[in-house]
Image (tube, rainbow, N blue to C red):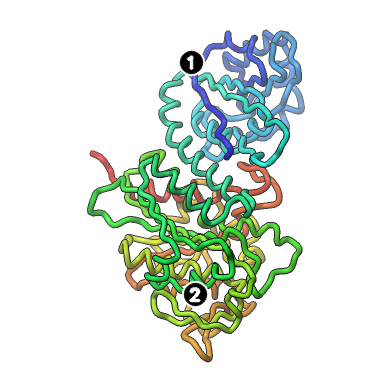
């Protein structure tokens, strides 16, 4: 597994700059005013910083840009990085500035002379998020992971406010690691074992094996995994940080560790990317880790259905009819529409067992959502405006793209089956909506519910503001903020 870059806060002292190794960062606001650290850097470099600030290049720089002076005279550092940032940036500006510094650092030691910079904790979060690198399976010796030191006039205060952000970053790291892992490593058993290890953080973790799932009647979930030698499992993670009698928020994740499409076999091109089809379960796992590590004052239960969808002589066939845990019969038209078959049983189980105050399911569910929203936004579906709007507000606050799409009875006709209660697919038109409409059948009338289709945002082929290409960890920050803003117990 990868590790988080260490962050250390220390009292602001300009005398540390001259002998610092790696890269040294000073911050200059867009208007060019030079504070104590910038003035010291300017003296050390014999006026080079002042010439830069007065240059046309600096005048054209945007907020968050970094201008580097390589091997600066008078300093031991490999580079002096001049970060253009207002003293009072907004949250996104601070985080993206930190991410830009991390990208430049490339694993080198980093000394950030922040002085009295506002939102320095958010800048540090950006550094941590963008420093991520998944190299677990590279045989060359791993590059040294640099340390990050931030000098601030209120170092202790900033360190305290950064602690919960660092916990969330650790949840993001876990989600990225799980989503990036190849399927021969992250089997259903290995996935469950990694989740069980989080008992050390105070989570209650329970693994339901196939015999128990059959006893509960989770036949649609079991139908997905029956063609694989990897056993299907459901893992329940419970964080009890709120009042004892408070009903929990339920998070439900699709955990298809590899998706061949089953008998409805996918084309070979791009099938290697289907290691990320457990992305929803990865987000649930990372969110539960973040909540536990920051000791959230709320009750939250995370449930993930772990299966592998493979073709074999025992695999489910197109045309088979399977009865769900709820009791509805499902005609399986396409075995590559398997995620909803996993989710529907786990969602019903979550409601039956925990009577949650609300439920959010996450899944890399449809390619159609990528056609509609690209890789900038997850698709959001909900049966409750208040619940949904609160989540959208949290996602926006965390700069995680999310866009609401419609539901409606008119789409149900696409799911009508001649021989069963419902089909598992509704054809090409409105594919993401009919998938959500299918899931809504398994939501009780009094349960506020959100479905997040994260197929376009869970893993991407080019870098983002906060992550290298590959798994993004989308959703961990938004869910943590959603819990904080709407479900945490206020201590008077």
Q: Residue at x 51, y 46 (%)?
A: 398
Residue 437's disc is: 2
Q: Nearer the viewer, residue 181 or 469?
A: 181
Q: Residue at x 58, y 17 (%)?
A: 35
In this rendering, the answer to whether 257 lies above or below 159 is: below
Q: Nearer the viewer, residue 403 or 58?
A: 403
Q: Quadrant of residue 215?
A: bottom left
Q: On the rendered structure, is 267 left or right of 280?
A: right
Q: Residues within 10 Å of mark 2 (few under 14, many from 20)?
A: many
Q: Residue at x 54, y 47 (%)?
A: 175
In this rendering, the answer to whether 443 lies above or below 71 is: below
Expressed as whole percent of the image width and height from the top left, the position of residue 401 reads 56, 53
Q: Quick check: can you spot residue 74?
A: yes
Expressed as whole percent of the image width and height from the top left, the position of residue 162 reads 45, 31
| Image quadrant in which the N terminus is located | top right
Q: Give the structural element (helix, strand or loop) at label 2.
A: helix
Q: Which residue is mark 1?
A: 11
Expressed as whole percent of the image width and height from the top left, the position of residue 248 reads 32, 55
Q: Give the structural element (helix, strand or loop) at label 1.
A: strand
Q: Quadrant of residue 267?
A: bottom right
Q: On the rendered structure, is 79 left or right of 246?
A: right
Asked whether disc 2 touches disc 1, contact meaning CB atoms under 8 Å apart, the reply is no
Q: Nearer the viewer, mark 2 or mark 1?
A: 2
């Amino acid at each position: 597994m990868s590790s988080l870059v260490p962050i250390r806060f220390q009292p602001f002292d300009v005398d540390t700059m001259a002998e610092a190794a790696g890269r040294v960062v000073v911050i200059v606001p867009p208007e060019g005013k030079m504070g104590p650290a910038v003035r010291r850097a300017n003296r050390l470099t014999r006026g080079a910083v002042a010439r830069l600030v007065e240059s046309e290049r600096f005048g054209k720089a945007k907020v968050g840009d970094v201008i580097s002076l390589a091997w600066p005279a008078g300093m031991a550092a490999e580079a002096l990085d001049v970060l253009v940032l207002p003293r009072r940036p907004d949250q996104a500006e601070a985080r993206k500035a930190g991410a830009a510094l991390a990208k430049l650092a490339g694993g080198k030691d980093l000394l950030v002379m922040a002085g009295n910079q506002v939102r320095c904790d958010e800048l540090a979060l950006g550094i941590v998020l963008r420093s991520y690198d998944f190299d677990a399976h590279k045989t060359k010796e791993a590059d040294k992971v640099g340390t990050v030191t931030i000098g601030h006039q209120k170092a202790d205060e900033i360190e305290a406010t950064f602690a919960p952000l660092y916990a969330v970053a650790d949840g993001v790291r876990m989600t990225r690691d799980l989503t990036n892992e190849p399927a021969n490593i992250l089997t259903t058993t290995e996935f469950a074992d990694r989740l069980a290890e989080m008992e050390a953080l105070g989570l209650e973790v329970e693994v339901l094996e196939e015999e128990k799932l059959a006893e509960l009647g989770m036949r649609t979930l079991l139908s997905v995994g029956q063609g694989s030698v990897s056993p299907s499992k459901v893992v329940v993670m419970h964080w009890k940080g709120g009042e004892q009698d408070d009903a929990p928020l339920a998070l439900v994740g699709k955990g298809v560790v590899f998706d061949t499409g089953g008998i409805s076999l996918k084309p070979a091109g791009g099938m290697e990317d289907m290691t990320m089809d457990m992305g929803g379960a990865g987000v649930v796992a990372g969110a539960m880790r973040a909540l536990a590590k920051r000791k959230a004052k709320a009750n939250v239960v995370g449930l993930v259905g772990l299966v592998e969808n493979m073709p074999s002589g025992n695999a489910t066939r197109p045309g088979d009819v399977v009865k769900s845990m709820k009791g509805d019969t499902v005609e399986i038209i396409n075995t590559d529409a398997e995620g909803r078959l996993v989710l529907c049983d786990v969602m019903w189980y979550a409601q039956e067992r925990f009577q949650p105050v609300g439920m959010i399911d996450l899944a890399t569910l449809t390619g159609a959502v990528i056609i509609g929203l690209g890789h900038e936004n997850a698709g959001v579906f909900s049966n409750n405006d208040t619940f949904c709007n609160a989540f959208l507000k949290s996602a926006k606050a965390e700069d995680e793209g999310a866009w609401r799409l419609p539901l409606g009875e008119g789409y149900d006709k696409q799911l009508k089956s001649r021989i069963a209660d419902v089909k598992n697919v509704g054809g090409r038109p409105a594919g993401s909506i009919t998938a959500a409409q299918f899931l809504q059948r398994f939501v009780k009338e009094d349960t506020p519910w959100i479905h997040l289709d994260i197929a376009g945002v869970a893993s991407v082929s080019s870098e983002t503001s906060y992550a290298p290409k590959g798994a993004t960890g989308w959703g961990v920050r938004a869910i943590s903020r959603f819990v904080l803003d709407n479900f945490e117990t206020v201590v008077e």
